[in-house]
Image: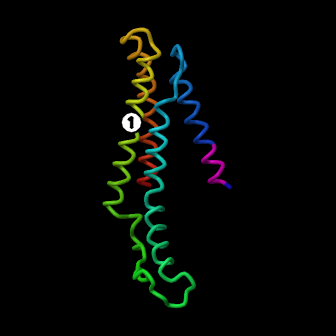
Amino acid sequence: MVSSVGLLFLTGLAAVAVTAATRGQRSPSAAGLVPLAVGVAGACLLAFGLVRVVDAASVLSDPYGTGWDLLGTITWRGPANWESSRRLAWAELAILLLGTVGGVVAAHDATLRSEPGRASAERALLPQLLTGSVLAVAVLLVLLG
């Protein structure tokens, strides 16, 4: 229950921050949030997904638990230390970085389309860049913790 309430609170806090960051624009766009959200979700769920894929391959080889080895993958088990793997941490960081860069590019393009001049677009983009960077650093701290 506490984790669910915490997740809702942090999601609401992120939504308020993004809303405040796009408030000064003529036509606010949350286009930068989609790549950022995909990067965050991908980084947070990478370890879970890898472990589940390996477990699924093992279960598919012996679907009834009778000792069969139909696919030759019955001995596949995810290592217990995957969550603390350096390679996995770098992969999560790369996914988060790609999502953040994608969010910045999408926000930049949307701001250039909505603002009348380049200088105005750059001024409108600064709060979005700051908000996206703070959110990405917060996710990075969660992944490291």
In x, y percent, where is residue 82? 39, 67
Tell me the quarter of the picture where residue 19 sits.
top right
- The residue identified by callout 1 is 102
Q: Is residue 45 above or below residue 65?
A: above
Q: Residue furthest front?
A: 70
Which residue is found at the position 45% from the left and 39% from the top?
A: 36
Q: Residue furthest top?
A: 116
Residue at x 46%, y 46% (from the top left corner): 40
Residue closest to the far bottom? 67
Q: Quadrant of the C terminus?
A: bottom left
100 within the magenta span: no
**Colour option used:** rainbow
Amino acid of disc 1: Gly
Residue interval drawn in magenta:
2-8
Using the image as rendered, state which of residue 141 and residue 112 is in the foreground: 112
- Above or below residue 66? Residue 78 is above
Identify which residue is drawn at 36% across, 42% down: 98
Residue lying at the far right of the rendered structure: 1
- Around disc 1, counting alpha carbons within 10 Å, would you say few (fewer than 14), some (14 to 19), or many (20 or more)? many
Residue 12 shown left or right of residue 36 in the figure: right
Residue 89 lies, in percent from the top left, at 35, 56
Secondary structure predominantly adopted by residues drawn in magenta? helix
Q: Which of these two is toward me, 131 or 120? A: 120
In this view of the protein, which residue sits in the foreground, 39 or 9? 39
Q: Is residue 3 magenta?
A: yes
Q: Residue at x 34, y 54 (%)?
A: 91
Per the image, label 1 sits on a secondary structure element best described as helix
Which quadrant of the rendered structure holds the N terminus?
Answer: bottom right
